[in-house]
Image: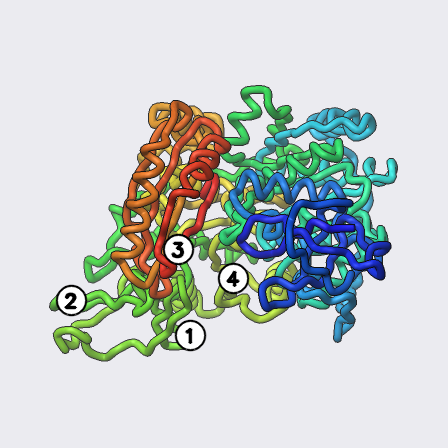
Amino acid sequence: MYVNIVLGLPIEGPFTYEAPDNLSASAAIGKRVWVPFGNRRLVGYIVGLVDKTSVKNIRPMYSVIDEEPVLSIDLLNTAKWISEYYFCSWGEAIEAALPPALKKGKKDLKPRLKEDLEDIKPSFHQVLNEEQDKAFKTLLSDIEQDKHNVYLLHGITGSGKTEVYMQAIGKALDKNKTSIVLVPEISLTPQAIERFKSRFNEQVAVLHSHLTEAARFCEWKKIKENKATVVIGARSAVFAPVKNLGLIVIDEEQETSYKQQDSPRYHAREVAIKRAGLTNAVVILGSATPSLETYHNAKAGIYKFINLTKRIDDRELPSVQIIDMRHYMNNSRKQAMLSRPLVDSIKSVLDKKEQVILFLNRRGFATFMNCKKCGFVIKCKNCDATLTYHFQNKELVCHWCGYREAPPDTCPKCKSSYISYFGAGTEKVESEISRIFASAHINRMDTDATLKRGSHKKILNSFKTGDTQLLVGTQMVAKGHDYPGVTLVGVVSADSALHIPDFRSGERTFSLLTQVAGRAGRGKKPGKVLVQTFTPEHYAIISASKHDYTAFYNEEIRSRKELDLPPYSHLVKITFRSHSQAKAMESAQGLTKLLQEKKNKNILHIAGPVISSIPRLRKEYRWDVILKARRAEDAVNLLRNALPKFKKSSLVKMAVDVDPI
């Protein structure tokens, strides 16, 4: 007997091995095995069993690791689809679906510490309002009939989408079906986990990358053994080994964190839809600001559309005021970071013992350091990126590779002492607010403040209990949180994402502003939002201030159609990286030439080669080639056809990103 095996390496398989007599009975599809590969001993995954083969000099496998398959047929098929669509090997796609311990060939792991199980008070299904009830009944009929459909649940912030998810999950459980709930940021999970555990207690398992290896393995095992039937987690939870899948919920489906940034570069939303299709499950894509692709599909009838237009208990949406920062200077005629109206509003809210969220999507104290005399800007020595000054540790940090250095006293180039800090990040906002409101309890939530395990929870708990009056943060504070005490949200700079050379910058800005505005006024008191900007006339900012998704969509979709950008096309980005600038460029040119020769009518455009937006990253130079086609498959097929003739230097690495974000 022979087995077909794939490996977690970027090489096409499957490879054929012999199953010796003592192993042939235990070999089964979906099990892990130890096999020789070259002069290494690797973990492989059985994807097929055959009686005969034409392959010569076949080596025997060493041993079968598992008693039961670790991969179900639907997961193997999902991984196969990922490998074809996202241009990676089947083995790499399989490894994306497994916890780290299993990829290393381990069979069991005991967590060292018992996780502290808090006292979570049980909660019960709430009475749905008319809109929620209609949404729930629509979903219910598909769950009961095992009918695969994709729904866009488009609900304004605070319209009670989570309650609809919960009741749909409850119905799936009544039918002995399992559910997977994806949330975008790990920072959202403490609150999400609490809400789901209070409703479904022991049945909930949690999967995300912040868990220790052992804890992740234990949760995986709990799901595999059917001891947990509701799974919550970040994008990799889409691969949870559930049986009898009935429902997948993707909350905040527009979030970019659902896209994996290294191989396999899959998008959890697309994978969820594929997996649900294989198991006749229902998919709910929930969002107040759906991605253009999703909304476009809903309008075209590819997805079904459900709309929630009212907040729970008919609460008002917060009023939004746009502040034109061109009118605000401080005493020394320099640009003020906080305008007078924002400072006054914070004061009045703190006086009333209510809470404030201040949002700025940049961490650190100053975004760059430069010399006023010669203009020299201090950059990272590994990347073409400026270093950000972090006040707390008194150091300059590269947010791309993590390189750190002490800030100089004099300019490294002209030795003058006219060196100063420019730009503002969350640290600077925090220090400025602490100076103005010395007696207020202020906390900061960004990647730097949440490095320690459990720190997310600590910061949010302090905010929840009201100990923290003012929370400053990056996009971590913008989404999903529900704190009734928050009556004011201040956006320090609405422009930080607007002027990035990326066709999605308007969409991202609209989404973030709408989401962060939605944190205000979720309790009995009405909320207020102040948005500081230098471009008050931009349609993304105007539409967000009116909570008007349709107006934004209609404006944005026009330019996308004119330029043939997604959702009217698919992009594939091919990046070449090398320590040698010339070699990276040469490879990019070589492939572009082959692609041009094989181009067919399905390909709309081949762009490049061009230097990447960050030309040098972690000491490697980067060049991009971009394919644009009506269907992603057409671009991937063109690439597959061109590669056999393509020769590149061994000093160059190539990465393919299908539907890049």
Q: Residue at x 20, y 62 (%)?
A: 332
Q: Which residue is mark 2?
A: 372
Q: Is residue 208 visible?
A: yes
Query: Crowding near pointer 2: few (<14 within 10 Å), some, many (20+)?
Result: some
* Mark 1 or mark 4: whose residue is earlier in sequence: 1
Marks 2 and 3, how far apart in space? 30 Å
Residue type of the residue flagged with mark 1: Gln
Marks 2 and 1, how far apart in space? 24 Å
Q: Position of residue 63 (x, y in %)?
A: 76, 64
* Mark 2 or mark 1: whose residue is earlier in sequence: 2
- Res. 536 image quadrant: top left
Residue type of the residue flagged with mark 4: Met
Q: Which mark is residue 343?
A: 3
* Mark 2 or mark 4: whose residue is earlier in sequence: 2
Q: Residue at x 41, y 76 (%)?
A: 393
Marks 4 and 3, how far apart in space? 20 Å
Tell me the SS state at disc 2: loop
Vertical placement of 205 versus 82: above or below? below
Q: Position of residue 510 (x, y in %)?
A: 44, 38
Tell me the SS state at disc 4: strand
Q: Which mark is residue 240?
A: none
Residue type of the residue flagged with mark 3: Val
Q: Which residue is mark 4?
A: 445
- Res. 338 image quadrant: bottom left
Could you tell me if the residues under marks 1 and 3 are in contact, i.e. CB atoms within 8 Å? no
Q: Nearer the viewer, residue 360 or 86?
A: 86
Q: Which residue is mark 1?
A: 392
Marks 1 and 3, how far apart in space? 24 Å
Between disc 2 and disc 3, the foreground one is 2
